[in-house]
Amino acid sequence: MPRTDSATDCADCRGLFNGTPQPHYDHVHTTDKLPRARCTEEHIVKHGYAVGFAGNSGLPQTWIFFADLEPAVVFGRAARMSAFDVNHYGVSEAAGETRYTERLGRDVVTLHLKQDSHLRDHDNEMPILKRWVRGCRPDSAYYEGPCHR
């Protein structure tokens, strides 16, 4: 079930691909500049990358956030390799934001997509894919990039 608050009344939610409700985001905004990173008890903004994909047979536009570029690119490529379901994907700079809202008594989750930051480039993906393989650990669900070692 989609999350609900005032997303239908939010002018920023009406941009490209943003008309489709996302079950895991209250808002999806397209912006020229991402909000600055922060981490407090009531407000977290993490920069990373979002993969957007859509497909045939009613698969709606869906966005998934990743902290690292490598798993985002691999996820998009793998989704596109589905036999029938996904016919388009893109990778964009993004920020995931979680802010506690007293009025609703819960966290409101927003995905900010940086306008014109499309990073899908098949000609230069091989080094990214190799870094992803090196950063995978069988005993962990987390990607461990070079800066994590």
Image (cartoon, rainbow, N blue to C red):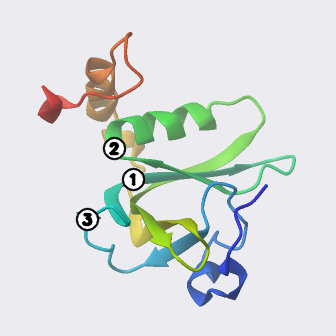
* Residue 15 drawn at (x, y percent): 60, 79
Are there few (<14), some (14-19), or many (20+) residues within 10 Å of tag 1? many
16 to 69, vertically: above or below: below
Viewer-proximal residue among 13 and 9: 9
Count all numbered tags in the image, as a single digit. Answer: 3
Give the numbered dot on residue 65: none
Q: Amino acid at mark 2?
A: Leu
Are there few (<14), some (14-19), or many (20+) residues within 10 Å of tag 3? few
Q: Amino acid at mark 1?
A: Tyr
Q: Tell me what residue is drawn at x 34 percent, y 37 percent.
A: 70
Q: Tell me what residue is drawn at x 56 percent, y 31 percent.
A: 78
Q: Secondary structure at mark 2?
A: helix
Q: Which residue occupies the extreme right position in the image? A: 57
Q: Label 1: which residue?
A: 49
* Residue 121 drawn at (x, y percent): 39, 48
User: What's the CA distance linking mark 2 and mark 3?
Assistant: 20 Å
Give the numbered dot on residue 69: 2
Q: Secondary structure at mark 3?
A: strand
Query: In the rendered structure, which disc, 1 or 3, sits on the residue that comes first in sequence?
Result: 3
Query: In the rendered structure, which disc, 1 or 2, sits on the residue that comes first in sequence?
Result: 1
95 to 147, vertically: above or below: below
Q: Report if the CB atoms under discs 2 and 3 are less than 8 Å apart.
A: no
User: What's the CA distance linking mark 1 and mark 3?
Assistant: 16 Å
Q: Label 3: which residue?
A: 38
* Residue 136 drawn at (x, y percent): 33, 19
118 to 133, vertically: above or below: below
Viewer-proximal residue among 130 and 60: 60
Q: Tell me what residue is drawn at x 69 percent, y 51 percent.
A: 54
